[in-house]
Every structure is written in structure tokens, then in C-alpha cells.
Amino acid sequence: MADPQTTLSYMREQCQDLAIKINTMDLDKTEHELVIKALEPLDPARKCFRMIGNVVVERTVAEVLPAVRKNKDQIAKTMEGFTEMMAAKQKEADAYANEHKITETKGAAPKAAAPVDEGASQGVLI
């Protein structure tokens, strides 16, 4: 059986990985929104280019705009799923920490200074 602290650390790492994925997807969604905003006022018959995989293809605004909207919606739906998954994993990790009585520290707390003897030599602080 694995060390409870190691297991909890792994659980927290999974949550962190999900948060990174969510942030990356949010950036992608924002990019899609900017493209939609740029394409909406244009003539639907106007020529535009779209990258599919590593290939740039010529299309019209009327063909590209619905596809970009659909992709944005799919990204948003996936983000919702990841957000729910992350919340569940965080609850699971919190419950595991409580069950095993593990206290977590956020960052390294400074250690308390040892009491200074009045007669001891003092160092110079520069």
C-alpha cells in the first residue's frame, strides 16, 4: 500500500493537471471567439482560409463560421466536463486527507527562529 502522503500528492497533481488543461482550453475558446467576432461582419461569400490539421484550405466565410462556432461550443462543453471532474477529484482528495489526518502546507512555512542567547555573538546583516 502506498504512503498516504504520496497518494494525496498524486491526487493533488491530477487536479493541477486538470486545471492546466482547463486554462489551455479557455485560451483556445477565447481565440475561437475572436475569430467569430472578426468573421461575423464579413460578407458570407467572401473568401477565407482555414487551417485543417497542417493544411490551409480555401473556403468562404459562410462555410467557416458555423464550423468555428461548433468548435467553440465543443470546447466549452469539454471545459465544463473537466471542471466537474476537477471538483470531484478535489473533494476526493480532501476526503482522503481528512480520512488519513494529513495536514497540508501551502508552500514552505518559515521555521521558527531559535531563541537567541543574550551573550551569544550576533552575525552582521547586510
Image (cartoon, rainbow, N blue to C red):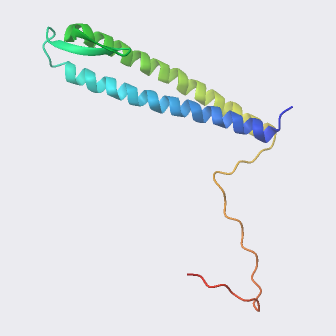
Instruction: Count all numbered tags in the image, as a single digit.
Output: 0
- Residue 24 vertical position relative to residue 108 in the rendered view, above or below: above
Q: Looking at the picture, tell me which residue is in the foreground, 120 or 103.
A: 120
Please state, as top left, top right, bottom left or bottom right, where the C terminus lies in the image. bottom right
Q: Quadrant of residue 101?
A: top right
Q: Residue at x 74, y 82 (%)?
A: 116
Residue ranking furthest to the bottom: 119
Is residue 80 toward the left or the right of residue 112 in the image? left
Q: Position of residue 29 (x, y in %)?
A: 38, 25
Residue ranking furthest to the right: 1
Q: Position of residue 100 (x, y in %)?
A: 81, 39
Q: Quadrant of residue 40?
A: top left
Please state, as top left, top right, bottom left or bottom right, where the N terminus lies in the image. top right
Q: Quadrant of residue 33?
A: top left
Q: Position of residue 7 (x, y in %)?
A: 76, 35
Q: Residue at x 77, y 86 (%)?
A: 117
Q: Residue at x 20, y 19 (%)?
A: 39
